[in-house]
Amino acid sequence: MVHRSYSFPILLVSLLFVTISLSTLNTQVPLWLKHNEFSLFQIGLVGSSYFVGNLVGTFIANWLISKFNTRKTYSYVCLIFALATLGLSLSMDAYSWSFWRFLIGVACAVTWVIVESCILVTGSAHNRGKMLAIYMTTYYLGTVFGQALLRYFPKDVLYFGLVIATLMALAIFFILLTHYKLPKKKKSSFDLMPMLLYKPARLGLMGCVVAGMIIGSIYSLLPAYYSYLNYDDSAVANWIILLILSGVVAQIPMGWFADRYGKLRLLFVEMIIAIFACLLLITHQFTIFATILFGATIYTVYPISMAWACQTVRKQDIVTMNQTMLLVNTIGSLIAPAIIALVMDIGGIHYLFISFVVISMYYAALLAKDLFINKRSKDARSI
């Protein structure tokens, strides 16, 4: 028990180094590509390759953990992360950078599976929710720290990679101090089709897709969007810090509203607010206020959708549902950046937020149908 109590904060410290590294790369890579006159479609392609890696990493994580062990697997993927970042300095073309970003995506997905599995396996029904909340807060704070530290990182690709390698070494050092041991599985239990087809959870799964599409596009395309508006790199980092920090601050209040007023009802309200915020950003009106609104809503869609989907399944299916949600979230993150980047190439940079409006309107329509039309039909049948 002592080992477990010390392992959890040490695990979070290790995760913090990984998240800081990822956060800086998510902003700096699009800026490097933009400064080297890559098209928006190529920037979106490199961004999507990272999410392809996430998808692959989600599938192979359990196999890696079973073949090696928890700490070795975590250490190996951190090493891959460092080497892939250094690999970015070897060439400057969209295809090679897509490959290196793909490897980084694989490494990140495996670390997330390991961290979340350690929490789910060692936590109890009474403290698991609190542990997951602390985990998500740590992840988002690491993202904010990464943006804040970005201005102090070297701009040269090679020296930037050396800094990332140092952070990965620290992540490996701390994970080796933990005592987590995940159970090895004789065969894969990654059978997600029943969860994908489970109708009561469909709105929760769709929320995960929507969150993946929008947040994936934010990480892949928003730095380039601000760069096209002639913001310097420090200003770009500041806007992204504001966006993510708004999501961090909103986590606990939105969770309270979800429990009190209903998760689907809150998701519907969030989509309406997100649409309003995007319209303000498109017209460049009250941009600070709009950015805060947008971050507070979009960054809380995934945990609320996850909570809704998990409450519709049996307790023994919660882990499988979590894996399913990570999968569909990754698919959304994979598909959207490349498509939206192509639309932006054709129509202009303002189509980034127009795309977010279309996605949000579609999800809001699905939620409205369930909340109002289906509820009215059920009430009529009961009479």
Image: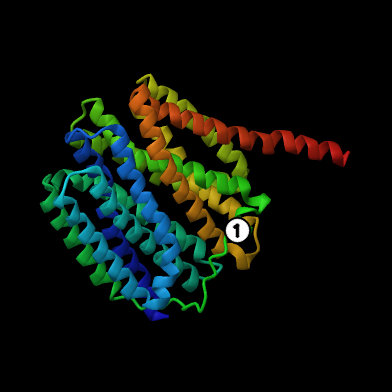
Name the foreground residue: 347 vs 279: 347
Establish if 12 lies above or below 283: below
The front one of 212 and 372 is 212
- Residue drawn at (38%, 19%), measured in percent from left and top? 283
Q: Which quarter of the rendering shows the C terminus?
A: top right
Amino acid type of the residue that numbered disc 1 sits on in the rendered structure? Met
> Residue lying furthest right in this view?
383
* Residue 9: image location, x then y, percent: 34, 67
* Residue at the image point whose x is 27% and y is 30% from the top: 226
Q: Tell me how many marks there are.
A: 1
- How does the figure colour the protein chain or chains? rainbow
Residue in the foreground of this view, choosing between 153 and 87: 87
Residue 338 x %, y %: 38, 38
Dot 1 falls on a residue whose secondary structure is helix
- Please determine whether, in this image, residue 120 is positioned above or below residue 289: below
**Residue 296 appears left or right of 150:** right
The answer, for residue 299, to whether it is visible in the render is no
Residue 362 on image: x %, y %: 56, 33
Residue at (29%, 38%) from the top-left corner? 43
Q: Quadrant of the N terminus?
A: bottom left
From the top left corner, tell me how far across and down residue 296 is, in percent.
43, 39
In the rendered view, tell whether residue 318 sits above or below residue 65.
above
**Residue 47 visible:** yes
How many residues crowd mark 1 within 10 Å: few (<14), some (14–19), many (20+)? Answer: few
> What residue is disc 1 on?
193
Identify the residue shown where x is 68% and y is 37%: 371
